C-alpha cells in the first residue's frame, strides 16, 4: 500500500502587511460604505488603492492598485483578519516589475527594495477618508479603471437612473454593486448622495438603471 505524502506549497513571494488600511477599512464598515478609493504618490509613480467588500462582491478580499502613470492594474488577494488590522498580500515578480515601471526605475541591481517601498506606501495611507473624497476619487478614475473592474457594478452597461424599486417584501437589501452607480452617474453634491444611500438602505429600496439614455429620469431625493 502506497502512502501518499502531502506536499506543502511554500509561497516564496515577498509578503507585506498593509496595516495602514485598518482605520479607513473599519471606518467604512462602521459607516456602511463598503467602497474605498484613494491615491498615493511615490516618486514618479501614482498609485490608486481600491477595495470593494460588500458580501455580494466577489472582490471583497481583494486589493486593487492602479498604476496611473503606466495604466496598469495590480490585484492582490488579502489574507488574515482585516477587522483586527491585518491585510497580508504577496508580491509576485511581475508585480515588482510593474511597480518599477511605474516608478520609472530602469534596471539596476540592488537599487529597489520592494519591502521598503510598501512600508513607505503603508505609512502614507490616510487614516480618515471622507465620503466626499471617496466619491470624487472613484468618479475621477473610473473611466480609466473600468475595463479592469467590471465585476464591481451590477449590469455595468446600465448607467442611466430611472427610479426606485421597493425590496421590503423580498427580504433583500440594496447591494453595494448597484448603489455604487450613484457615486459615478449622479451629478449631485456628495452629501446628497450619502443621504440618499442611507435612506435607501433604511427603507429597503434600490435604484433602477437602464442603458437607454432616452429613458433616463431626473434624480431627486424623492425619486
Image (cartoon, rainbow, N blue to C red):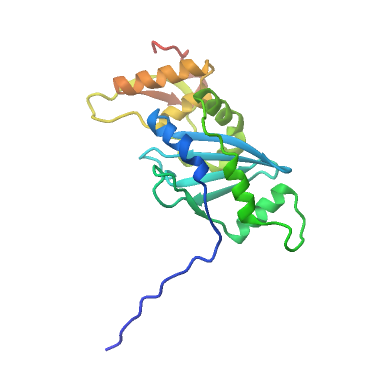
Could you say where residue 169 lies in the image, as x and y percent from the top left?
22, 25
Q: Judge left or right: residue 130 versus residue 97.
A: left
Could you say where residue 156 lies in the image, as x and y percent from the top left?
48, 34
Residue 149 visible in the snapshot = yes
Residue sitting nearer the eye, 176 or 115:
115
Could you say where residue 122 lies in the image, as x and y percent from the top left?
57, 44
Could you say where residue 32 lies in the image, as x and y percent from the top left?
38, 29
Q: Quadrant of residue 47?
A: top right
Q: Judge left or right: residue 59 versus residue 112.
A: left
Q: Quadrant of residue 110?
A: bottom right
Q: Residue sitting at 77 percent across and 61 percent down? A: 108
Q: Judge left or right: residue 158 versus residue 222.
A: right
Q: Residue sitting at 47 percent across and 36 percent down? A: 23
Q: Quadrant of residue 6?
A: bottom left
Residue sitting nearer the eye, 151 or 78:
78
Looking at the rendered image, the quarter that the C terminus falls into is top left
Q: Residue sitting at 43 percent across and 47 percent down? A: 61
Against 22, residue 160 (above or below) is above
Residue 156 visible in the snapshot = no
Name, please, the residue furthest toward the bottom. 1
Against 183, residue 34 (above or below) is below
Count of all numbered marks drawn on residues in the image: 0
Q: Judge left or right: residue 201 versus residue 157.
A: left
Looking at the rendered image, the quarter that the N terminus falls into is bottom left
Amino acid at each position: 500500500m502506497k502512502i501518499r505524502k502531502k506536499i506543502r506549497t511554500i509561497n516564496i513571494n515577498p509578503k507585506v502587511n498593509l496595516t495602514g488600511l485598518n482605520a479607513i477599512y473599519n471606518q467604512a464598515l462602521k459607516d456602511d460604505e463598503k467602497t474605498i478609493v484613494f491615491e498615493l504618490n511615490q516618486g514618479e509613480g501614482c498609485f490608486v488603492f481600491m477595495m470593494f467588500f460588500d458580501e455580494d462582491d466577489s472582490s471583497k478580499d481583494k486589493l486593487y492598485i492602479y498604476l496611473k502613470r503606466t495604466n496598469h492594474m495590480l490585484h492582490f488577494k488579502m489574507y488574515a483578519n482585516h477587522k483586527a488590522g491585518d491585510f497580508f498580500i504577496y508580491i509576485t515578480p511581475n508585480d515588482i516589475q510593474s511597480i518599477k515601471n511605474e516608478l520609472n526605475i530602469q534596471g539596476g541591481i540592488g537599487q529597489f527594495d520592494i519591502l521598503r517601498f510598501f512600508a513607505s506606501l503603508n505609512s502614507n495611507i490616510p487614516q480618515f477618508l471622507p465620503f466626499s473624497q471617496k466619491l470624487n476619487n472613484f468618479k475621477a478614475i473610473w473611466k480609466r479603471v473600468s475595463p479592469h473592474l467590471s465585476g464591481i457594478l451590477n449590469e455595468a452597461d446600465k448607467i442611466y437612473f430611472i427610479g426606485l424599486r421597493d425590496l421590503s417584501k423580498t427580504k433583500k437589501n440594496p447591494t453595494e454593486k448597484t448603489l455604487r452607480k450613484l457615486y459615478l452617474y449622479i451629478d449631485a453634491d456628495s452629501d446628497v448622495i450619502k443621504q440618499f444611500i442611507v435612506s435607501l438602505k433604511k427603507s429597503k429600496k434600490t435604484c433602477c438603471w437602464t442603458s437607454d439614455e432616452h429613458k433616463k429620469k431626473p434624480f431627486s431625493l424623492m425619486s
